[in-house]
Image (cartoon, rainbow, N blue to C red):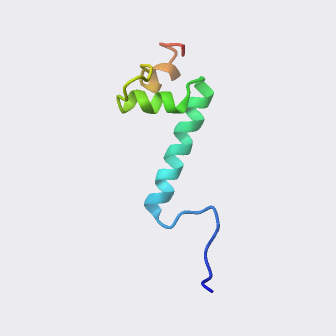
Amino acid sequence: MTRRNVSAGTRSDGGRDCRDAFLGLAKTCDKLGIALWDYLGSRLTTPGHIVVQPLDRYVRGQFRPA
């Protein structure tokens, strides 16, 4: 039997940085009332997603989420 590491951590520094960035983005979208998947779909220009302005415009108060 092989012992496995089953903690919630990542295996690399890059993986940790990616997880931290994604969680930070998710929390920011949640605070602004924007669905994370709508934001990502807008940034990746996925057909059928709503257009979401860059988050700094919402933070500065120039736009209000729909």
| 15 over 46 or under it: above or below | below
Q: Position of residue 64 (x, y in %)?
A: 53, 13
Q: In the rendered view, would you say 48 is above or below 63?
A: below
Identify the residue at image location x=64%, y=66%: 7
User: Is 46 or 27 nearer to us in this picture?
Assistant: 46
Q: Quadrant of residue 52?
A: top left
| Between 3 and 12, the one nearer to me in the picture | 3
Q: Quadrant of residue 9?
A: bottom right
Left/right of residue 1 with respect to residue 55 in the rendered view: right
Q: Residue at x 42, y 25 (%)?
A: 54
Q: Nearer the viewer, residue 60 or 2?
A: 2
Instruction: State the image coordinates of residue 20 (x, y, percent, origin top left).
Output: 53, 49
The quadrant in which the C terminus is found is top right
Residue drawn at (50%, 20%) of the image: 58
Pick whichever, 21 or 59, lies toward us: 21
* Residue depicted at x 52% and y 51%: 19
Residue 42 image point, x, y percent: 41, 27
Location of the N terminus by quadrant is bottom right
